[in-house]
Amino acid sequence: MKQRYLALAFAALLAADGPLSSLHAADAVPLTDFSGAWRLDDANSDNDATVTKKLQDESRAEQAASNNAQQPTSGSLPSATEHAGLHGRRGGAGHKKDKDDKKTDDEPAKPHAYPLPQLLKIDSVLLVQQDSKSVQVRLSSGDTLNGRLDGGSQQSLNGAAIVRSHNEGGKLVMEFQFADGSTLQQTWEMSADKHTLTVHEQWKPIGLQQPVFYKRTYVALG
């Protein structure tokens, strides 16, 4: 099923490659050359705990918005007479239930558990090779991330994801689509002195409506 999903998604992305390729071929700002060895700067990077909290916060916010949208309108609420009659039939048990309901409503929603991005655990060292047509990134795990620079799609990470890469104002943008429907977008930019690489990332696991944003910062080796 996973391989079939990737094959279908890959075919669909290939069909859309033409217009995107033409669009970015006209980009007037040349792409920065990110070739070299890069080590993660832990002190200036978001870690597992930070990204986990961002996922939990977004999950709570989306649950709260969903609950608010499902609240009954004023026209659907019982009248004062109906409300009094309802309480009269309930008796003391009804008052207790009202208190229990209020207590439940006041409790914060428990966030869903969402997975962390796969790359977060294997990106402590990046070995980057880049030419005019492609970029290749060897990760600390030994996995290789490949991307075409014409906006075309390519299977990467040993077939675990489909990647589209392009130049956006001199920055490298890489868009990942994983087999379960999760998506990741990276935007690479280099400091003026070429000693620091910052990767801004947007992670959207399946089930979350909006992505969470985090960054990873690297320093040049050698």
Image (spheres, rainbow, N blue to C red):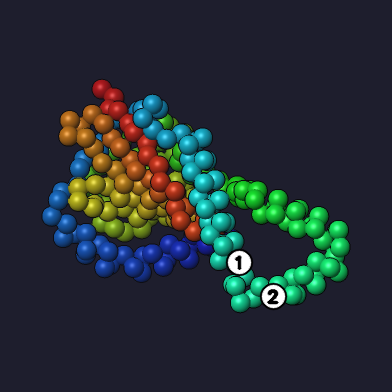
| Residue in the foreground of this view, choosing between 115 and 107 | 107
Give the spatial CA distance, label 2 vs label 1: 17 Å
Query: Residue 197: percent from the left, percent from the top?
Result: 28, 35
Badge 2 or badge 1: first in the primary sequence: 1
**Outermost residue, top direction?**
222
Q: Secondary structure at mark 2?
A: loop
13 lies left or right of 220: right
Neighbor class of circle 2 (other Cα within 10 Å; few <14, some 14-19, many 20+) is few
Q: For the residue labelled by badge 1, is the local secondary structure a helix, a strand or a loop? A: loop
Regarding residue 158, the answer to whether it shows in the image is: yes
Q: From the image, state whether disc 2 or disc 1 is nearer to you.
A: 2
Other-residue count near label 1 (Cα within 10 Å), few / some / many at <14 / 14–19 / ≥20: few
Q: Quadrant of residue 105?
A: bottom right
Residue 61 on image: x %, y %: 52, 53
Q: Is residue 28 above or below residue 117?
A: below
Q: Amino acid at mark 2?
A: Ser
Q: Is residue 34 left or right of residue 80?
A: left
Q: Residue at x 82, y 61 (%)?
A: 94
| Residue bearing mark 1 | 71
Q: Nearer the viewer, residue 112 or 121?
A: 112
Indicate the position of residue 136 as horizontal and vertical percent values. 33, 42
Closest to the observer: 164 or 203? 203
- Type of the residue with mark 1: Gln
Camera-nearest residue between 34 and 169: 169
Residue holding disc 2: 79
Q: Please indicate whether residue 30 sits to the left or right of residue 72 in the image.
A: left
Let me know if residue 178 appears in the view. no
The x and y percentages for residue 71 are 61, 66
Residue visible at 23% across and 52% down in the picture: 168
